[in-house]
Image (cartoon, rainbow, N blue to C red):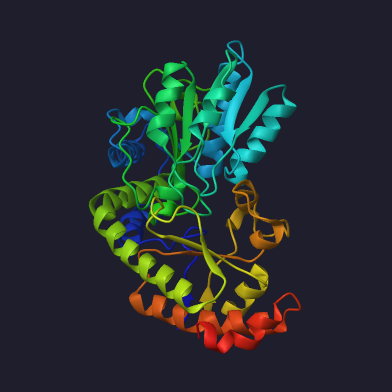
């Protein structure tokens, strides 16, 4: 039996979501722009499931939800759309040093369009330094974008404080909620954010559909031009089966998120304790307490993370070294470097992320097999100190 601990990269679609979607794949398949009765059915579904996604984040107006093809498109619409809409007011954008690669690459694109981008520093846990953020703000700052949590090390960001700083300076604030979407409830009535990126698959819905929440009064320029769907902000025929799946997943997640988060936290804590107590020279990356319940990010001295992943693969255990969207590069994690780690420290990392179908026996299996893999790799490495090689068996195994 394989053990899957890479839920931040991809999640399976919940069977209850699949059941909800099926009729819209082969029976109620019409285009909501059509004027016939079947088109009306599609329009009704669009309205109903848009409301479910809005309710998931406690948005008072369902029309504040703009459907997209996924989180990356939502981030593009948020940053590029907001920047172009407000370029007469200013040309300065702030992101964090540890944002997801989609945000960082969008920022690079905007720099090529003439915008200025500043990156706010983080502390040793990967948490935004609010004092540094305040110093970066100028009269030309029009947008701040910081994710709800680190998608890599799991540290939760002070989103409420950032939103207040943005509001006080009349700056738009965007947050990518993907890192915490499935484990931490988001209430946009209480949290004064202007734009929020959401993803269907991150709450066990289908891939290929996401959303951007826009607070009342906030407008962005469209980046896809066509038939004017989604109130003119995202053209293209709506993906009704995907939206139905997204809405159903949102409905289920709202009911189950607190219970599931508590369950995952228990498993995560067991995993962290098991790894740190059995493997010498092992460390937890990210904040030790204020982190997402499903994330455990480790580093191990004297080994390469890629070798560790292959060793786990041989044992039918799926994990990661970092963000899946940038895992093909051999460069050390930009997040870990921003946190102050050396390149050799960043290279020895392991990201485990838990999910809805993670069981305690999966955690037990990893705790049993991981120390043996780490030991084997260290004994093969010329970097391992002689005293650790000599005493390895006696130290923690």
As drawn, is 157 to the left or to the right of 89?
left
Any part of residue 357 in sight: no
- Above or below residue 141? Residue 110 is below
Identity of the residue drawn at 42% across and 20% down: 167
Q: Position of residue 198 (x, y in %)?
A: 43, 42
> In the visual, does 280 lie left or right of 196?
right
Tell me where residue 272 appears, x and y as whole percent.
Answer: 43, 68
Locate residue 276, reporting x and y percent. 47, 71
Residue at the outermost front position: 387
Task: Indicate the position of residue 279 as horizontal and vertical percent values.
Answer: 52, 77
Q: Relative to the observer, which residue lies in front, 266 or 397?
A: 397
How many marks are shown on the rendered structure? Answer: 0
Q: Picture quarter containing residue 120?
A: top right
* In-image side of 25 versus 392 (left or right): left
User: Extreme top residue here?
Assistant: 88
Q: Does the rendering let one see residue 132?
A: yes
Q: Quadrant of the N terminus?
A: bottom left
Q: 292 above or below 164? A: below
Residue 63 sits above or below residue 252 on the image: above
Residue at the image position 40 percent from the left and 17 percent from the top: 217
Left or right position of 249 against 369: left
Q: Is residue 268 above or below residue 96?
A: below
């Amino acid at each position: 039996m394989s053990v899957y601990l890479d839920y931040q990269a991809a999640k399976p679609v919940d069977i209850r979501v699949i059941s909800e979607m099926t009729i819209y794949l082969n029976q109620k398949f019409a285009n909501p722009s059509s004027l016939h009765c079947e088109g009306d059915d599609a329009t009704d579904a669009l309205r109903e499931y848009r409301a479910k996604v809005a309710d998931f984040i406690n948005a008072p107006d369902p029309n504040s939800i703009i459907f997209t093809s996924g989180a990356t498109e939502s981030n593009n619409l948020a940053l590029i759309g907001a920047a172009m809409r407000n370029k007469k007011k200013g040309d300065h954008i702030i992101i964090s040093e540890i944002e997801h690669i989609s945000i960082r690459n969008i920022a690079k694109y905007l720099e090529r369009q003439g915008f200025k981008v500043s990156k706010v520093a983080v502390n040793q846990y990967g948490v935004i330094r609010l004092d540094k953020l305040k110093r970066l703000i100028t009269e030309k700052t029009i947008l701040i974008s910081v994710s709800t949590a680190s998608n890599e090390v799991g540290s939760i960001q002070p989103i409420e404080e950032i939103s207040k700083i943005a509001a006080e300076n009349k700056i738009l604030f965007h947050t990518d909620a993907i890192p915490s979407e499935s484990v931490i409830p988001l209430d946009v009535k209480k949290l004064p954010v202007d734009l929020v990126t959401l993803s269907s698959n991150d709450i066990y819905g289908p891939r290929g559909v996401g959303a951007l929440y826009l607070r009342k009064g906030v407008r962005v320029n469209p980046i896809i031009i066509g038939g004017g769907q989604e109130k003119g902000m995202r053209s293209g025929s709506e993906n009704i089966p995907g939206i139905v799946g997204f809405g159903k997943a949102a409905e289920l997640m709202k009911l189950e998120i607190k219970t599931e988060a508590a369950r995952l936290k228990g498993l995560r804590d067991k995993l962290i304790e098991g790894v740190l107590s059995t493997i010498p020279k092992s460390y937890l990356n990210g904040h030790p307490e204020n982190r997402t319940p499903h994330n455990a990010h480790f580093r191990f001295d004297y080994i390469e993370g890629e070798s560790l992943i292959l060793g786990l693969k041989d044992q039918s255990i799926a994990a990661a070294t970092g963000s899946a969207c940038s895992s093909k590069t051999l460069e050390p994690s930009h997040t870990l470097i921003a946190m102050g780690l050396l390149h050799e420290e960043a290279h020895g990392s392991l990201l485990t992320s838990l999910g809805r179908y993670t069981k305690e026996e999966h955690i037990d299996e990893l705790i049993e097999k991981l120390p043996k893999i780490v030991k084997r790799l260290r004994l093969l490495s010329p970097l391992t100190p002689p005293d650790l090689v000599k005493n390895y068996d006696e130290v923690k195994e």
